[in-house]
Image (cartoon, rainbow, N blue to C red):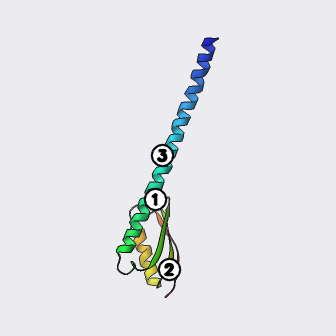
Amino acid sequence: MIRRRLTGLLLVSSLVVPFAAGCAKATAGANLAAFDDAQVTTRVKTALINDPAIGTERIDVETSGGVVTLSGRVSSKEAEQKALALARGARGVTSVTSTLEIQP
């Protein structure tokens, strides 16, 4: 009887432990992705602010999975294109989407 319980306990633990470890890895991966997205957002914002032509524009930056979304207002089509180019050039960016409005 005790032997059966021990065998059952070992069987259950051999199934649960790898599952728990996989869940921990998935959570760590999600946290790492969020951290990477925050770094990408910071890099893009820094590039935008440091550019003399774009630094005064009102541009918000959001990043999810390396995909950067620029939103807000710019003064011209050229400013929008420059902001897109700066964002694409930042390390970690996989693609850039723009919802920027042009308001001279």
The image position of residue 97, as x and y in percent, is 51, 70
How would you rate the neighbour count of disc 1 (Cα within 10 Å): few for under 14, some for 14-19, many for 20 or more? many
Q: Amino acid at mark 1?
A: Asp
How would you rate the neighbour count of disc 2 (Cα within 10 Å): few for under 14, some for 14-19, many for 20 or more? some
Specify the quadrant that holds the N terminus: top right
Which residue is found at the position 38% from the left and 74% from the top? 49
N-terminal label among 1 and 2: 1
Residue of label 1? 37
Question: Do the residues bearing badges 1 and 3 touch, measured as CB atoms within 8 Å?
Answer: no
Q: Say what secondary structure mark 1 lies in.
A: helix
Q: Amino acid at mark 2?
A: Arg
- Residue 73 shows which numbered tag? 2
Residue 40 falls in which quadrant of the image? bottom left
Q: Amino acid at mark 3?
A: Ala
The span from disc 1 to disc 2 (Cα, nearest Å) is 22 Å
The span from disc 1 to disc 3 (Cα, nearest Å) is 14 Å
N-terminal label among 1 and 3: 3
Question: Do the residues bearing badges 1 and 2 touch, measured as CB atoms within 8 Å?
Answer: no
Q: Classify residue 71 as left or right of residue 79.
A: right
- Residue 28 shows which numbered tag? 3
Which residue is found at the position 41% from the left and 60% from the top? 39
- Asked if residue 14 is positioned above or below residue 2 in the image, the reply reads below
Q: Classify residue 54 as left or right of residue 9.
A: left
